[in-house]
Amino acid sequence: MQQALKASQLPPEALALWVAPVDSTRPRWRWREAAPQNPASLTKLATSFAALEQLGPAWRWKTPVWLDGTLEPERGLFKGDLVIQGRGDPSLVLERVWLLLRRVQQLGVREIQGDIVLDNHAFAPDPQSPADFDGEPWRAGNVRPDALLFNYKAHTLLVRPDPARGVAWLQLDTGLAPAQDRVPLKPGPCLDGRGQLRASWVEEAGRATGPLRLAGSWPASCGEAAWPLADPEPASYNARLIETMWRALGGKLTGWVRAGNAPADRAPSFELSSPPLSDVVQDINKHSNNLMAEQLWLTLALQAGSEPATPEAARQGLRQWLRQRLGWPEDGWQLENGSGLARGSRLSAAQLGQLLQAAWASPVMPEFMASLPIVGEDGTLRREPERFGAARGRAHLKTGSLRDVQAVAGYLLTARGERLVVVAMIQHERAGAGRPVLDALLRTLAQSP
């Protein structure tokens, strides 16, 4: 470890470390284990563990839908409003929005002589903008939470190289805004394909919802790629998407898509259920999905009775649960949100180790552990598997990364069959150079006799 730190030009004080058997409170290795550090995306360990224990692995979000009017199914005519109420479901991607609209059509609706009403009041309005954290509003991970969240309020730009024509073809999966259809191909290694393209949205009538333009070229060696991009007008995204998809399914709409309130005096016509929480937590932890983690964090507050759910209620709810569940002190630590996309959060390596040990002894351990990336195999730890050596396939670890943070935490099985809790956190202005330090730790632990 000292050699790896020296090679990375990092001081030993940049590292915090805590390693212990899953069933022992006596750490095997420790270094600055009580020092408060920014946990970055290791925060998601607390959010997902709390959710699995409080709600249960089989729990599902419900998105209620009302046909608020009269239906003439023989004519496919519905006179009234189609009302969709968001309750925080983070899994309403394109396919599931399509399923929701197909359910409406299966009830006999082909033409809506009224409005489509979207109710997102279960979460309090978010005052932040996608650009607040790092000044990059186009990053899909910076989209803000919404009780009614369609497709992460984002698009996926599909890039398909065509060497015979010397171009890479471009297509947006949502069809909401046209995009230029090609960029030039160029030779050379695939070092940073996305970095070779610069995206911008053309403004029309003062709003950035016009065509997507891309400058630059695509390295042919990068092959096909999918690039998530946040929509430049998130406030109107849901309305634009639902109307586009309804018309693409052959549906007619004489009114508008607008914000409103769901009926409070009668049951919905149907509810669309999300995948089970255990599946959603896998998406959150394996791919470090910030927006889904924030949706889950606010959902915990909503389920606890805070409606509309606010960040403060979610913050206090998770804090209270961690103090009661793990016996943490009142002061000396802080989690600003549920994803780790924050500068002021602080946890120690020993606290994260304690959380992981509690999760190991919990009834939800199988679902929690299965949600973590497998080293060298999937999620955020799938790339360059050779760097992990003997640790490849022997550990389930959550990663954390910010401008000045590199961290891993989870479970590792040694060569002799001992399961360890591993927490390693680097906080330094040169933290990005510290990945070899964490890799060296994992290789060493995996080979422990």
Image: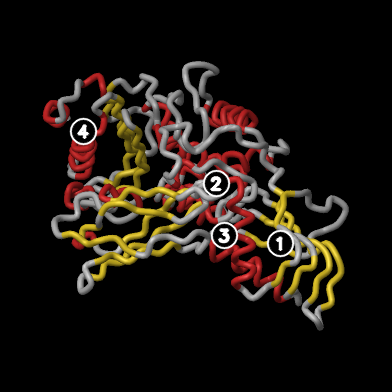
Q: Is residue 408 shown above or below 349?
A: below
Near mark 3 (Cα within 10 A), the count class, few <14, some 14-19 or many ≥20, is some
| Mark before the other along the chain sequence, 3 or 4 | 3
Q: Is residue 326 left or right of residue 60?
A: left
In the rendering, at what x and y percent does residue 6 appear? 13, 26
Q: Amino acid at mark 4?
A: Ala
Q: Amino acid at mark 3?
A: Pro
Q: CA distance from mark 4 to mark 2?
A: 40 Å
Q: Are marks 1 and 2 in contact (CB under 8 Å)?
A: no
In the rendering, at what x and y percent does residue 53 appear? 57, 43
Q: Classify the position of the C terminus by image quarter.
A: top left
Q: CA distance from mark 1 to mark 2?
A: 34 Å
Q: Are marks 3 and 2 in contact (CB under 8 Å)?
A: no
Q: Is residue 386 left or right of residue 90?
A: left
| Residue 433: numbered disc | 4
Q: Provide the residue designation for mark 2.
A: 207
Residue lying farthest bottom? 74
Closest to the camera, between mark 3 and mark 4, is 4
| Mark before the other along the chain sequence, 1 or 2 | 2
Name the residue nearer the viewer: 344 or 218: 218
Q: CA distance from mark 4 to mark 1?
A: 48 Å
Q: Classify the position of the N terminus by image quarter.
A: top left
Q: Amino acid at mark 2?
A: Arg
Q: Provide the residue designation for mark 1.
A: 271
Closest to the camera, between mark 1 and mark 3, is 1
Name the residue nearer the viewer: 11 or 105: 105
In the rendering, at what x and y percent does residue 178 appear? 47, 61
Q: Residue at x 39, y 26 (%)?
A: 38
- Residue 285 in sight: yes
Near mark 2 (Cα within 10 A), the count class, few <14, some 14-19 or many ≥20, is few
| Mark before the other along the chain sequence, 4 or 2 | 2
| Residue 275: numbered disc | 3
